[in-house]
Amino acid sequence: MSLGERKKTILRAVIIDYIDTAEPVGSRTIAKKYEMGISSATIRNEMADLEELGYLEQPHTSAGRIPSDKGYRFFVNELMELQRPSNYEIEAVRNFLDRTTIDEIDNIIKQISKILSNITQYTSAVLSPSVKKSSVKSIQLIQLSLTDIIAVVITDTGIVRHCKIKIPRPISSNTLIAINNMLNEKLAGLTVEDIDLSVISSIQLEMKGYDEILNSIIPVLNESLKSFDCDIFLDGTTNIFHYPEYNDIEKAKNFLSLLEHKEKLLDIFSEDDSNITVSIGKENIYDEVKECSIVKASYKIGDKTLGKIGVIGPTRMNYAKVIGILKYLTDTLNNMLKNQLDE
Amino acid sequence: MSLGERKKTILRAVIIDYIDTAEPVGSRTIAKKYEMGISSATIRNEMADLEELGYLEQPHTSAGRIPSDKGYRFFVNELMELQRPSNYEIEAVRNFLDRTTIDEIDNIIKQISKILSNITQYTSAVLSPSVKKSSVKSIQLIQLSLTDIIAVVITDTGIVRHCKIKIPRPISSNTLIAINNMLNEKLAGLTVEDIDLSVISSIQLEMKGYDEILNSIIPVLNESLKSFDCDIFLDGTTNIFHYPEYNDIEKAKNFLSLLEHKEKLLDIFSEDDSNITVSIGKENIYDEVKECSIVKASYKIGDKTLGKIGVIGPTRMNYAKVIGILKYLTDTLNNMLKNQLDE
DNA sequence: AATTAGCACTCAATACAACAGAGTGCTAAC
DNA sequence: GTTAGCACTCTGTTGTATTGAGTGCTAATT
């Protein structure tokens, strides 16, 4: 069922105004502020229809209307005009990036996240690339003392992981090098999740006589790689205080508590792979964000999705702006990663 | 000027009660709840004296008294009885530690911080060891591609830092090993802050002919080590919502904003070296924490102070408990570090 | 038939007064 | 020196009246 042109215009006006002011929007406001050429009474009738259709709702009888989740959804899908970042914002991004050493992927994505929360004034989140889905590029065993080794693993996605390994008794540096070479030979090119028992036993087979030492290294290394897969970084966590809907201490608390529960955020940001997704209010699965909206995008290198970057804010979010910025930033990020990692 | 015994008893009772209830404490409450054997009128007189002396204050005439910063200070210095952790709490610490792989120092201190905020229900912070004051234990250059190197530096304090280095043109693996050996030889044992121009030029002198390659490696490595010295990790940031003094949205916002400003926290946690310090309310330098108290302690390995661990909460903080737990946790932590790093 | 002016109605928010209660300081008695 | 008693102060709560924004409906207008 499609809305008449005039209803669309009115719905758009209500949503834009509400996003701007956080106050229920009345028919007079629409008539005056958005020169419609029709009277408030007519608008009133239209708004009553829009409410009946589920696009608007009324906090109480004597208040104006506010958009429903369905209203925002329609706005995002069909009404809004995507907002390209302003020159000022593009300039800000440049400045930001110039001021930091951009070397490793973690730093890059953290920095991008900071920019994102800064420009949008919402909370931003980035999901680092999955270790399990990365493939091993290089492993290095560094001997620290007679019985201590640091293993450093570098992946094709630019992640550097290290873990400390205690070995039961001293080994010669030649042995260590031999083991190191073997690990590289056997594991390089494999994704971390592909490292399973068969791979491990093939290594053990080939290095008969080093059982004890291998048994102290491989399980620890394996565990360390698999124990935590990706990390999530937040920025602008106190930005919500800019928005009056969070003047209610309970809501603020609820929101901020979510941010402390990384597992939930991981869950939210891990799903699906499509390009830019918007989930509005009750569309979200977790209760904690049923009054929030989340806009997220994937960043990738070539065709391979590495991780996610996104924004969490009130359902009354400036979607047009956020989506515009997010598009721009993921493009920027993708380019940077291409230059960094692809050679 | 020393307080009479009875005044002390009353002051202690007021503070304990206020820490417990967050409500101004009246004379009748003291008389009834803390069986003093004297009437409320007498207590009233004593409290008036304590107010005049600056240990208590009155929000308004018809309210009870609340402790002043000076009152808390006196309490901490002379009145309170340090509270040893309960068996239950000690058990909780054990459980917590058992459930995590305790390998590298960052993980250990993060975990301890989590325990601390969990038990105290305040916000905890840990300051990681200073890189500048750590000495280099081992450097490893790992070749990733023809023009990409990852340098891994390990310090005596257990920090593992890595940075990516682009080199202008390909070098042989033998050259890389030679450079690697030279770096280890020249830098191992030095603290990071000791790596200055003279050291660098001594390396360059000894490796004549590799100028170009050294010039691409050493400055980046040096910069990466010195660019950020120590990190601060927080836990339990939303714990403040447990305390009614932060029901005021402005105060909560103020507090949480501070937590986003790592530089300020670094500053607060970096100063001085003594064992356990308590700074109460206006004793703090930064405005943002003039209504908070901070309790912090150093963790060390042997005699060498590595970093700090502490708690930030309202001035109405359970000092006896917090200090008790903090003592216990730093002891635990110091032991763990000794076992980890000392061999 | 669509639009609009007009009006009665609703409801949240604000302001104000009255009141209760906790706690004090002071005085006088013990 | 201590305490009982009492007048006084001030906050917080409750109840009531008022205001004002905004609606829905009806009747008049185009």
Image (cartoon, coloured by chain):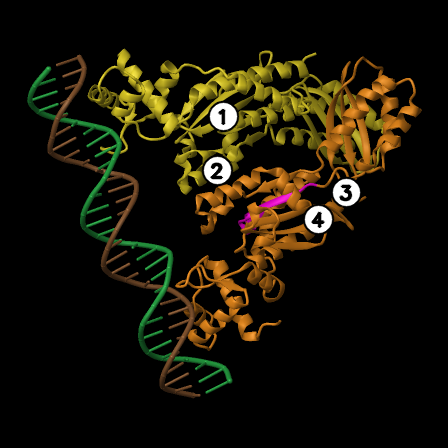
Chain colours: A orange, B yellow, C green, D brown
What's under tag 3, amino acid-wise? Leu
Q: Indicate whether B92 appears above or below A29.
A: above
Q: Regarding mark 4 in the picture, which secondary structure is present there? A: strand
What separation in Å lies between label 2 and label 3 (alpha carbons)? 37 Å
The CA distance from mark 2 to mark 4 is: 30 Å
Give the mark toward the camera: 4 or 1. 1
Could one spot residue A100 in this view of the protein? no
Q: Chain of mark 3?
A: A
Which numbered marker is on residue A299?
4
B218 and A101: which one is in front? A101
Amino acid on which the number 2 mark rests in the picture: Leu
Helix, strand or loop under label 1:
helix
- Asked where in the image residue B11 lies, by quadrant, the reply is top left
Q: Position of residue A259 (x, y in %)?
A: 57, 40
The answer for how far apart the CA atoms under marks 4 and 1 are is 40 Å
Residue B61 location, quadrant:
top left
Q: Amino acid at mark 4?
A: Tyr
**In this figure, which residue is indicated by the disc labeled 2?**
B256
Dot in front, 1 or 3? 1
Q: From the viewer's perspective, tell me whether residue B83 is left or right of residue A324.
A: left
Looking at marks 2 and 1 on the same chain, the residue that comes earlier in the sequence is marked by: 1
- In the picture of the structure, the residue carrying the numbered disc 3 is A341
Q: Which residues are magenta?
A: A117-128
Q: Is residue B167 magenta?
A: no
Locate the N terminus of chain B and report the quarter of the image it occupies.
Answer: top left
Question: Which picture quadrant has residue B65?
Answer: top left
